[in-house]
Each structure stands twice: as C-alpha cells, then as structure tokens.
C-alpha cells in the first residue's frame, strides 16, 4: 500500500512535478479509489471506415426485407436443410422477420432468408418451356424418324469420330506369376 501511494503521488523532484509512475510509464497508474470513482462518459464513435473494410474483406452483406417481398427461407423441418419459397409478413426486430411459407408462419433471422426471383407458382406443364426453346432455336418439333441409320444421322450432325484404329494395351496382374504382363 505504501509503495503504491508513493508511486502515485506527485513529487517535486521528478520532471514536471509528476508522480514517479507517470515519469516511468508515461501514464497515471490505476488505484483502488479509481475503481470507485465513476469515469466521465465519452460517447464512443463508430469507426465506419474499419467496419467497411471488415465487411468488404469478410463478404458481409446488409440484408433488409420489406413486407410482401418474395423470399426463400431456410427450412429445418425433417432434418432437411433446404430453401422454401414464401414472403415477408412483417419485421419483428432489427434482423428478425415473420415469414409466411406455404400454410404456416415462421420466424427467421435475416441470415436465414434470401431474396427470391422465382415466380409465385411454378408451371406444372413441362412442354410449354420446351416448345418455347425449340421455337427459339428453330429446331424441329418432332424427333427424327428411327428409320434413318445412325451413321447417316451422325454425318448430318457433323460429329467427329476418333481416327484411332489401335487401342492402347493395358497391364494386368498374372496371378500365377504375380507380376504384370501386357494384355492386348
């Protein structure tokens, strides 16, 4: 106790009449009484530049959703991690949302939601997109007739064939000799 109070007390024999501790370590040492005294309140400024650098480096994305927005929500039912389509009902907290998915209401964190660009209802008839695709590329609607030979069909499609006539040999183990021999 004596040494602590001696080191913390200002002294006329030290430079600038400061305490020995301040001369040695260039700051005031912490005493028991400092713990009891309240510190003056200094509002902490946010270091926005540091936040921006951290978010850029770690790929952080600000996610905000509005009510009625189509989203994909993480589905944890039946031990199956999948994404289910729904929409936002309301925002509950800073990053928590109430979500309507199928016939139920879920509460999800913003990290468990993704914006959806899927249509509301998926078309059940797969022939419609196929017809659009065939029309776009001017392809025939009907498959080619089976009476054509496969070689003639390949020549029409200009498919390249291998010119190799000799195939490489493979090594096989001869069980009696327990060594490798060439197999043609």
Image: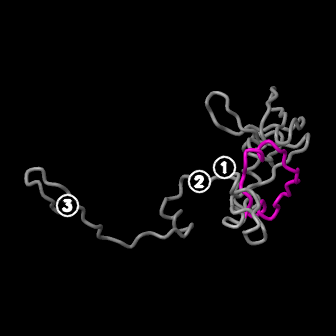
Q: Which of the 4 image quarters holds residue 60?
A: bottom right
Point out the residue furthest to the left here.
Answer: 177
**Residue contact between numbered discs 1 and 2, judged by CB atoms under 8 Å:** no
Task: Give the answer, above or below, for where 58 lies relative to 72.
Answer: below
Q: Does residue 137 appear in the picture of this structure? A: no
**Residue contact between numbered discs 2 and 3, judged by CB atoms under 8 Å:** no
162 or 86: nearer the viewer: 86
Please say whether residue 85 is one of the residues in the magenta stretch.
Answer: no
**Residue 117 coordinates in the image, percent (x, y):** 81, 49
How many numbered badges does the structure rendering display?
3
20 or 124: nearer the viewer: 20
Distance (Cα) linking label 2 and label 3:
41 Å
The reply, left or right, for residue 157 in relation to residue 53 is: left
Q: Residues within 10 Å of mark 3 (few under 14, many from 20)?
A: few
Q: Residue at x 77, y 67 (%)?
A: 12
Which portion, as a residue range, is magenta? 27-53
**Residue 111 coordinates in the image, percent (x, y):** 74, 44
Q: Residue at x 77, y 63 (%)?
A: 50
Distance (Cα) linking label 1 and label 2:
106 Å
44 or 111: nearer the viewer: 44
- Name the residue that disc number 1 marks: 2
- Name the residue that disc number 3 marks: 183
Mark 1 or 2, nearer chain start: 1
172 or 183: nearer the viewer: 172
């Amino acid at each position: 106790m004596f040494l602590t109070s001696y080191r913390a007390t200002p002294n006329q024999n030290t430079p600038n009449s400061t305490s020995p501790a301040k001369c040695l370590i260039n700051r005031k040492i912490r005493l028991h009484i400092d713990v009891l005294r309240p510190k003056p309140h200094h509002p902490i400024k946010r270091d926005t530049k540091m936040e921006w650098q951290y978010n850029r480096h770690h790929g952080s994305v600000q996610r905000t959703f509005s009510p009625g927005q189509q989203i994909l929500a993480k589905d944890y039912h039946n031990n199956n991690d999948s994404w289910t389509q729904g929409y936002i009902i309301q925002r509950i907290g800073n990053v928590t949302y109430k979500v309507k998915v199928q016939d139920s209401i879920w509460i999800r964190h913003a990290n468990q939601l993704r914006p959806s660009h899927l249509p509301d209802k998926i078309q059940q008839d797969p022939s419609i997109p196929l017809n659009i695709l065939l029309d776009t590329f001017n392809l025939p609607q009907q498959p080619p007739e089976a009476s054509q030979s496969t070689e003639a069909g390949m020549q029409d499609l200009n498919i390249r064939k291998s010119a190799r006539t000799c195939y490489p040999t493979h090594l096989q183990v001869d069980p009696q000799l327990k060594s490798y021999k060439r197999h043609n």
